Amino acid sequence: GLYGFNGTLVGIAILFFFEVNVFTALAIIIGSILSTLIMYVMKKRVPAFTAPFVIATWLMILGIKFLNLAPFLSSSTPNSSPDFFSAISMGFGQVMFQGNLITGAIFLLAILINSSTAAIYALYGSLLGVLIAILFSLPLEMISIGLFGYNAVLCGIALGTKKWSGLILATFTIILSVLINYGLGKTGIITLTAPFVIATWIGLFAKNTLSIPSKQ
């Protein structure tokens, strides 16, 4: 599935941001093909993760908006104080652009079926992502719908292990992903999973540079 998940995300993203028409359908096809080609090139050099999805989707969004091929769909966010449980659950759902509590719970269950370690780190990532966002007084409406949790979830799954080094590395990248997410968002960029990719690359570079021991 390494050549499929990025294309899947491209398809979901295009129809999340734009209405369905001939041009957005074409963008899904082109974006999916492009993500596959980017994956092929990148995986020979660095862990690609979801970078092919991010790059392909950014290009498709730019093209659709520049050529005015489809209206950009706006989404409303709640203005109330965040519900802690909902924010954590939605952190899972937002990985696939699903701002839904039940969907998030189902995603967590699916991860648990595959790997208990991954599920623990995914839950840890969403929880820590919410806590860090609150600690830095980031926008409550964004916290509420899981926008500071989904990249953290991916960081936890990607780098978390049963060793202390894995916990340290996952924690570092989770915190970093929240800050990168907010920083990129302030520039007007649609962040997608770029914070996860950037934070994980930095974490792996730090691990290799510092030769973090793998003692339990």
Image (spheres, rainbow, N blue to C red):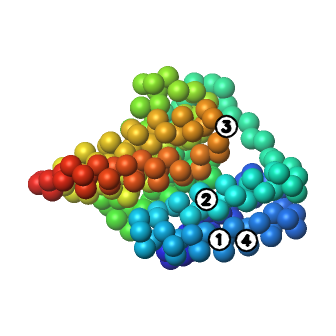
Measured in 3D between alpha carbons, the distance from the residue under mark 1 to the one under mark 3, in whole angstroms, is 24 Å
Residue 189 x, y percent position in the rendering: 64, 42
Residue positioned 46% across, 35% down in the render: 179
Question: What distance separates the C-alpha of mark 2 from that of mark 3?
Answer: 16 Å
Amino acid carrying mark 4 in the image: Ile
Question: 30 and 160: which one is in front?
Answer: 30
Which residue is label 2 attached to? 55
User: What amino acid does circle 3 point to?
Assistant: Gly
Q: Which residue is mark 3?
A: 188
Q: CA distance from mark 1 to mark 2?
A: 9 Å
Residue contact at pointers 4 and 1, CB within 8 angstroms: yes
Q: Earlier in the sequence, mark 4 or mark 3?
A: 4
Q: Say the numbered circle drawn on residue 66.
A: none
Instruction: Where is residue 196? Give x, y as percent.
Output: 47, 50
Q: Which residue is mark 1?
A: 34
Left of 65 or right of it: where is 151? left
Pointer 1 or 3: first along the chain: 1
Q: Quadrant of the C terminus?
A: bottom left
- Mark 2 or mark 3, earlier in chain: 2
Q: Is residue 45 above or below residue 104?
A: below
Q: Nearer the viewer, residue 55 or 92?
A: 55
SS of the residue at dot 1? helix
Counting residues from the start of the chain, the first of labels 1 and 2 encountered is 1
Q: Position of residue 169 (x, y in %)?
A: 28, 48
Q: What's the residue at 63%, 25% (across, down)?
A: 80
**Amino acid type of the residue tagged 2 in the rendering:** Ile
N-term mark: 2 or 4: 4
Mark 2 residue crowding within 10 angstroms, few (<14) / some (14–19) / many (20+):
some
Q: Give the Cα separation between the discs numbered 2 and 4.
A: 12 Å
**Residue denoted by label 4:** 30
Tell me if residue 15 comes above or below residue 178 in the rendering. below
